[in-house]
Image (tube, helix red, strand yellow):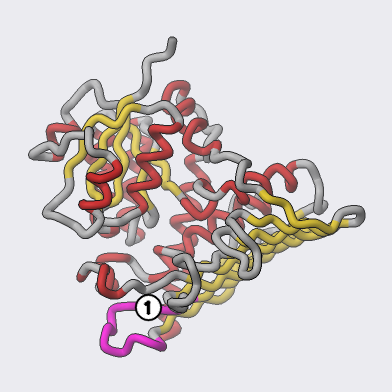
């Protein structure tokens, strides 16, 4: 029997830590400890979900423990790259919440550290890796159900939930900007579903339309990008209305030369449940319940930690997503000046 890999968490400032930790446990890893600075808002929910996992007095306790194989990070975004570098230098692999870094300097340091240490630095793009509908869509694309993919249109609306947000949420330097942060999900999906290794940002905009009292918050963003054989458009925002029964109506349309797929990930008004996949091609026009399609990223990543493979996601892909998100953010902010 294979000995379970053991992991610890550093930073629980974003609720994404709930899904990251739970899915690692479900894939067979053992959660053995955590540390965070202060008492961030997700702490009560975190302890409720993982009551038997001990909090330690210092992150160094976790980094210096030779029996811990990898670290998951969901602290304040601006701090994640620094902790990832410390963890890799301590011999640990790393799974970071997105954004994995907030500046080009941080990305460069991460590249150098991965090259120097040989460790794996992965970013958990939850809008693909924690969405069974995305798993099913990947299977359909691989089967050739819509021919060659030539475009994706991804939208990532979010609910502001102002009363629960910490100060860093409204600090541009702390969260990295709306395109660095949220749009990294859609950039990941563009590269993955089109099979592109690189892309060019052709348009990028950010704005604050609805929250003038919080000048550090960007509540709207959009990006257009293209590769050698595909095009993409992305819109992200903090405008989800209160009546919607979930945090956001995230959608992805994948256009192929022989059909299209639409993912209505978290809600489809008028229909029950989540993970709705709509497939239209030359012989099929149907709605697919993809809720049982599974989340293979987490199990594959554990295998990669053992074998030093890239079955979950290549290291080049992770770097490219972050690079493009930072390029889009810079273009948008330069244009807004």
Q: Viewed as shown, does residue 128 lie left or right of 210?
A: right
- In the displayed structure, would residue 189 be above or below residue 211? above
| Residue 117 image-quadrant placement | top left
At which x and y percent is residue 133? 62, 50
Query: Residue, x 62% and y 65% (percent of image)?
Result: 268
Magenta residue check for 144? no
At which x and y percent is residue 63? 19, 33
Residue 283 seen in the figure: yes
* Secondary structure type for disc 1: loop
Q: Which residue is mark 1?
A: 218
Q: Residue furthest left?
A: 57
Quick one: quadrant of the N terminus? top left
Query: Residue, x 10% and y 39% (percent of image)?
Result: 58
Quick one: quadrant of the C terminus? bottom left
Instruction: Give whichever of 93, 44 is nearer the camera.
Output: 44
- In the displayed structure, would residue 106 be above or below residue 135? below
Query: Residue, x 56% and y 69% (percent of image)?
Result: 155
Task: Give the total number of marks visible in the rendering.
Answer: 1
Q: Viewed as shown, does residue 165 lie left or right of 303?
A: left
At which x and y percent is residue 179? 44, 68
Magenta residue check for 218? yes
At which x and y percent is residue 200? 58, 64
For disc 1, the neighbor class at 10 Å (few under 14, some 14 to 19, many from 20) is many
Q: Residue furthest right?
A: 283
Majority secondary structure of the magenta segment? loop
Query: Residue, x 29% and y 58% (percent of image)?
Result: 77
Q: Viewed as shown, does residue 148 lie left or right of 208?
A: right
Q: Which residues are magenta?
A: 209-221
């Amino acid at each position: 029997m294979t000995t379970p890999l053991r992991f610890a968490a550093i930073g629980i400032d974003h609720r994404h830590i709930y899904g990251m930790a739970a899915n690692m446990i479900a894939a067979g890893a053992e959660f053995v400890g955590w540390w965070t600075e202060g008492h961030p808002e997700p702490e009560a929910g975190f302890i409720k979900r993982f009551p038997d996992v001990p909090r330690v007095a210092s992150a160094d306790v976790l980094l210096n423990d030779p029996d811990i194989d990898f670290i998951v990070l969901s602290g304040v975004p601006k701090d994640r790259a620094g902790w990832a570098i410390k963890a890799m230098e301590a011999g640990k692999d790393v799974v970071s919440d997105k954004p994995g870094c907030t500046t080009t300097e941080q990305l460069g340091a991460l590249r150098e550290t991965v090259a120097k240490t040989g460790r794996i630095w992965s970013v958990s793009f939850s809008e693909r890796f924690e969405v069974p509908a995305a798993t099913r869509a990947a299977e359909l694309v691989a089967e050739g159900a819509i021919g060659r993919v030539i475009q994706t249109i991804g939208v990532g609306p979010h609910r502001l939930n102002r009363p629960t947000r910490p100060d860093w949420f409204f600090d541009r330097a702390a969260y990295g900007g709306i395109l660095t942060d949220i749009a990294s999900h859609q950039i990941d999906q563009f590269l993955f579903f089109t099979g592109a290794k690189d892309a060019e940002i052709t348009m990028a905009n950010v704005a604050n339309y609805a929250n003038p009292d919080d000048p550090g918050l960007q509540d709207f963003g959009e990006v257009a990008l293209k590769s050698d054989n595909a095009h993409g458009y992305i819109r992200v925002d903090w405008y989800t209305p209160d009546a919607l029964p979930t945090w956001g109506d995230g959608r992805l349309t994948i256009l192929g030369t022989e059909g299209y797929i639409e993912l209505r990930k978290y809600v489809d008004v008028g229909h029950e449940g989540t993970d709705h996949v709509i497939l239209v091609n030359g012989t099929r026009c149907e709605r697919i319940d993809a809720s049982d399609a599974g989340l293979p990223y987490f199990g594959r990543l554990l295998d990669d930690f053992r074998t030093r493979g890239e079955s979950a996601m290549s290291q080049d892909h992770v770097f490219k997503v972050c690079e493009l998100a930072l390029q889009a953010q810079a273009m948008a902010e330069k244009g807004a000046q």
